[in-house]
């Protein structure tokens, strides 16, 4: 069958991790516009479904209220596109023209990126490692306006580049330096202190840290290192000072070993003690030291893997018809 009917959050989570693109049709049995657009959606599914690449699903919002709340569904029908487990687009209402345009474009882009090793194109959502089963990429919940990064060398990128959905330029161009410096480096020493507020309450399962230090530099002191030791603090209202962090017990301190770095993607998967990261509204990442004797540290991307734990109020659900301009 081309369209997968979702019967549990666990089933949907598994699909998000096994298929590069997932389209979800949130509907209700009582919704007339939902019934009107169903043949269009089914036709697109028959034409474009591809195993482990593009999966079409139907979710009865009245029966799967947790999923509807998690993804902010406030009216039926609502179509949501997920790429590599991450919510990227929403089409509200029974607008068959818009739905067709979005899905056809998505399928075309997916076809073009098939030869890219499954990592996504430089213009799309990028992940440096496999997402653990049952969890999704929730990096988009980081609030870019509230990010703070202490001891940053301002010759390189702003903190927000760490959470960009695009592939790092070092990987896209096949070398460690590019025209756009889309990574961060430390300034006076190897330490960095990053404050990440979230737009919703998260359950954080793991982190993916990506770092591409150059390999052709002669001055070892100036060559940036990959992170080694990271201390994590949760639910702080602001960034911690370096002296302040020394006086506060970390929720968890992790050490990234040399063998943890993937040679192809420059990414290390950092598992966390999940029980200690159940209701997270903010994270502070203290990059304590690097994997060598240098004085600089480099980080290209950070991905947050877990679940959106906040159950937002849905309000009154209404039908959405074929309204002009939808």
Image (cartoon, rainbow, N blue to C red):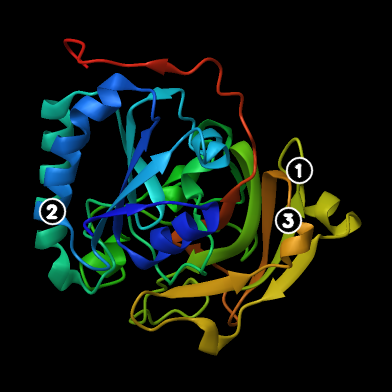
Dot 1, crowdedness within 10 Å: few (<14), some or many (≥20)? some
Question: Does dot 3 land on a helix, a strand or a loop?
Answer: loop
> Residue 200's quadrant in the figure?
top right
Cα distance in 3D space between marks 1 and 3? 10 Å
Residue at image x 81%, y 60%?
Answer: 251
Q: Are marks 1 and 2 in contact (CB under 8 Å)?
A: no
Residue 22 in the image: x percent, y percent? 31, 52
Residue at image x 23%, y 74%?
Answer: 117
Determine which of the numbered discs, if any, sits on residue 277 in the image. 3
Left or right: where 298 falls relative to 264: right
Q: Nearer the viewer, mark 1 or mark 3?
A: 3
Q: Earlier in the sequence, mark 1 or mark 2?
A: 2
The residue indicated by pointer 2 is: 46
> Residue 326's quadrant in the figure?
top left
In the figure, 315 relative to 47: above or below? above
The residue indicated by pointer 1 is: 235
Left or right: where 275 falls relative to 45: right
């Amino acid at each position: 069958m081309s369209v997968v009917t979702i019967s549990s959050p666990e089933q949907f989570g598994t699909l998000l991790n096994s298929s590069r693109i997932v389209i979800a049709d949130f509907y209700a049995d009582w919704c007339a516009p939902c019934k009107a657009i169903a043949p269009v959606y089914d036709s697109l599914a028959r034409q474009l479904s591809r195993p482990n690449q593009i999966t079409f699903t139907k979710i009865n919002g009245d029966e799967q209220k947790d999923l509807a709340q998690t993804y902010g569904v406030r009216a039926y029908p609502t179509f949501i596109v997920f790429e590599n487990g991450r919510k990227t687009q929403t089409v509200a209402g029974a607008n068959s023209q818009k739905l067709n345009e979005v899905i056809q474009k998505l399928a075309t882009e997916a076809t073009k990126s098939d030869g890219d090793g499954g990592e996504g194109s430089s213009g799309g959502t990028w992940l440096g490692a496999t997402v653990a089963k049952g969890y999704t990429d929730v990096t988009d919940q980081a609030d870019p306006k509230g990010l703070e990064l202490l001891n940053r060398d301002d010759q390189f990128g702003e903190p927000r580049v760490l959470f960009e959905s695009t592939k790092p330029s070092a990987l896209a161009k096949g070398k460690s330096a590019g025209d756009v410096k889309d990574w961060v480096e430390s300034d006076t020493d190897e330490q960095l202190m990053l404050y990440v507020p979230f737009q919703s309450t998260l359950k954080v399962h793991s982190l993916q840290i990506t770092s591409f230090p150059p390999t052709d530099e002669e001055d070892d002191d100036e060559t940036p290192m990959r992170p080694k030791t990271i201390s994590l603090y949760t639910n702080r209202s602001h960034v911690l000072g370096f002296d302040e962090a020394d006086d506060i017990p970390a929720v968890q301190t992790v050490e990234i070993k040399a063998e943890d770095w993937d040679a192809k993607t420059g990414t290390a998967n950092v598992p966390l003690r999940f029980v200690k990261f159940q209701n997270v509204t903010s994270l502070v990442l203290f990059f304590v030291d690097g994997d060598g004797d240098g004085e600089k540290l480099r980080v290209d991307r950070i991905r947050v893997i877990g679940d959106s734990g906040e159950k937002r109020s849905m309000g009154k659900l209404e039908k959405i018809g074929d309204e002009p301009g939808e």
